[in-house]
Amino acid sequence: MSTNAQSRTPKTAGRPGRSLAILALVLVALLAAVFIQGATSVKLGLDLRGGTSVTLQPRLASGESGKVTASAIDQAVSIIRQRVNSLGVAESEVTSQGSGVNRQIVISVPGDTGRRVVELVGQTAELRFRQVLVSGAPGATKTDGKTAATPPAGVSAATNAQYAALDCTLAANRKGTGSDKATDPIVACDRTGISKYILAPAEVLGRQISKASAAINQTTGSGWYVLLTFNDDGTKKFGALTTRVTSLPAPQNEVAVVLDGLVVTAPRINEAITSGNAEITGSFSQLEATDLANVLKYGALPLAFDRGEVQQISPTLGADQLHAGLLAGLIGLLLVLIYSLLYYRGLGLVSVGSLLIAGSLSYLLFLLLGKWIGFTLTLAGIAGAIVAIGITADSFIVYFERVRDEVREGRSVRSAVETGWHRARRTIIVADFVSIIAAALLYLFAVGGVRGFAFTLGLTTLIDLFVVFIFTKPIVTVVTRMKFYSSGHPLSGLSGKSLGVVIPTASTVKEA
Amino acid sequence: MSKLSGLGGRLYRGETSVDFIGKRRRWYAFSGVLIVASAIALSTQGLHLGIEFKGGSSFTVTKTAISVADATSAVTDSKIPGEVIVQKLGTNKVRVQTGALTSAESNAIQDSLAKRFDVNIESIDTQIVGPSWGKEITRKALYGLFGFLIVVLLYLAMAFEPKMAIAAIIAVIHDVFITVGIYALVGFDVTPATVIGFLTILGYSLYDTVVVFDKVRENTRTITSTSKMTYSQAANLAVNQTLVRSFNTSLIALMPVGSILFVGAGLLGAGTLKDLSLALFIGLATGTYSSIFIATPILARLREHEPAMQALAKRVAIRGAAPVAPVAVAAGASSPEKRGPRNQPKRNRRR
């Protein structure tokens, strides 16, 4: 057969060796990345390892008017994140899904935390202004009985002891629960944990703010500050508060801005502010000033959270679901492999190899994406991957059937492999692209589990395209140089008998 | 297997041919009946929506030798208002489903179940869905559906022909409608996993249609110059030529889905896997059917209305020749009985 020129073959034979080398390179690179990154296991979703997930729908707190804004939701997410982090459970996650003001907040906490999480995250977070009574270093004060300072005026001994014991260097203590009572004095940590406070009962509430914005000093052109405007009620109360504290000694001349039980900032009051317009200055960067303004704006319009969905999965059920998912995948894969071997014989071997390559690529990418973008594999995700086995195998079938059709049209096997590819390529691209569109739109519009499904479906379809181009086609080109395939051996999947034609040698190729 | 392959060869050359397009009225009538049945089932019975859509709570307790009666009395003890459904799942699970509950009420049920069966509260698998949540999910699913149909319509119109896009979309809508109808008729639970399944069917059904249409386009590219076949005949040949492929891809797609269904329903009893794969299983079947029996006949009908195609049909009629596939001319030399012997010497020569 080496004597025959392949005159009418489209130039798709390319250099199969090069494609296969690229594939090997990609596999090695991914494997190396896996080792370097230490990504040894796929991150499993809560439905596979047990845990609690809560989906919250933010809305205006009852009695408020106005509109939910995107920045208010951002604030809410960071408030909830702070609360969840205080649980100290590793790999807890707080994310928002969707876009703009229609976002949901999704909280996932692995392990047996159930009810605590649900109660922790559902509370409305309030912003309050409280006078500082005592402030100090964040660590717990060693109380040997005597050194505990006598409580300043207005602070009970109990509160003072609580203050002494409070250690703000621990993340667990920097939690907001929304449970701080406005009418009580409280002990509180700074948001960043650099100091701790005893604070007086709240005198001005966040919802009495009418406006807050970050601004830059116009005359010097540097020095960011925050402008704050109160409504009528707030103006009166803030006026009274500032008039009273401005002449007191430090730290009692400071007023703390407290969000969700944590001190955001505690500026010193330089003068009585009775106009309702305040400026908070300090050595703010633009980012810090904007953040503070956003916190104050959020305070003006606190969000409440509707429990959209709460799902608590025990580790036992998680393990069951994981096993079932993997078992289903294995059975599905085996069935497909057996069928393609029975039907396509020798060519079936090619599809077995391709599926194995696609499988390894998927697994390596799951490992790496877990590290890189926090991809977690959920039950729906496993289902997506299993469904993709079918899609991947489909593209081989499309190709193989084209090759067989070309042979039926009277081409030699080697020629049919190239012309068949020329035609099948387009079909595969269009069909896979439709699948990818479906996955992308599902991902964009859906929430929760659906997204996991869409992500794996999209990813595995892309892998399918890659494998068909870089492995399946080149390997078919390579193997059909072997006599076993090119002569149409009965077990090659290209035998004349099974195709119902005479396999021509290249020299007898006719005009089709 | 080789018999089937031989059939593939005969289908390819047009020696064996099923008249999919000529008998389109038959398929349309069949689909019409299904669609009417679906519409009736939908309007009279409606869909059996899971708690994710209507709001509610579900608590699953796993314990050996658990009984429905015990669970029912535990729920009664917690004094929960409204309808409560208690079901046994598998051998060692009981699921309690209630309407929408407040935080306190759901805690009460959990406590009561935990106490009755002497299990940890954390080991009770719980799902609580707020009443407004279902609307949100439904809205998003509908956005996804319409977004998908529009984008795919545009994409197929660009990649193929506008009329192919229309025919493909009609076939997809047909699939979704019938699948939804089957759900209404049988009363399967519709959960978000089912919706995922529905949406995936769209992709799959189109995948199938795309492959058939690709062949139709190839076969019809030169028909106006050769005047050997009408558009319908060429399209019918394409469906026949891709029949083996359609059969194989559908079978191969059904295998993993079937295994999810089997494992999901068999091992887990209920949940994501079962809901998803059931929707896929039904959808795949209708998807394969529609790409052959609905999409292509509709496409042929749309194209036959074009003046150029009508003129072609007249020319073909004047020639009076029975439709002969051009490929059959090239490959016609091999009659079946000579197949074996003639193959043999060639291979010898090659060695």
Image: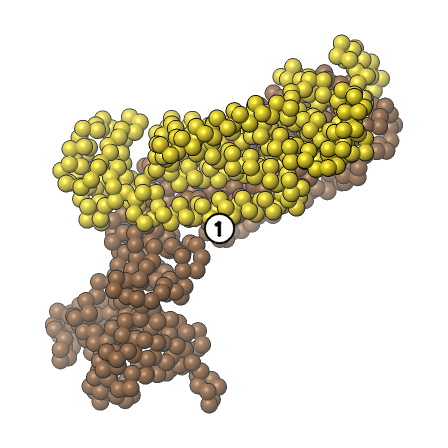
**Nearest the eye: A134 or B298:** B298
Return the x and y of residue A370 as percentages of the image width and height. Answer: 47, 49
Return the x and y of residue B53 as percentages of the image width and height. Answer: 34, 43
Q: Is residue A199 left or right of residue A7?
A: left
Callout 1 environment at 10 Å: few (<14), some (14 to 19), or many (20+)?
some
> How is the structure coloured here?
by chain
Is residue B84 visible in the rendered image? The answer is yes
Residue that badge 1 annotates:
A444
Parent chain of label 1: A
Label 1 sits on a secondary structure element that is helix
Residue found 21% across the figure and 29% down from its top: B68
Q: Is residue A1 left or right of residue A252?
A: right
Is residue A345 visible in the rendered image? The answer is no
Quadrant of the image for the C terminus of chain B? Answer: top right
Quadrant of the image for the N terminus of chain B? Answer: top right
Return the x and y of residue A440 as percentages of the image width and height. Answer: 53, 47
Return the x and y of residue A507 as percentages of the image width and height. Answer: 87, 25
**How many marks overall?**
1
Q: Amino acid at mark 1?
A: Leu
Residue found 34% across the figure and 42% down from its top: B52
What is chain B's hue in the picture? Answer: yellow
User: Which chain gets the brown colouring?
Assistant: A
Residue found 81% across the figure and 34% down from its top: B225
Q: Is residue B349 left or right of residue A248?
A: right
Seen in the picture, residue B348 relative to A89 is either above or below; the reply is above
Residue found 69% across the figure and 17% down from its top: B16
Seen in the picture, residue A127 relative to A406 is either above or below; the reply is below
Seen in the picture, residue A133 relative to B149 is either above or below; the reply is below
**Nearest the eye: A316 or B93:** B93
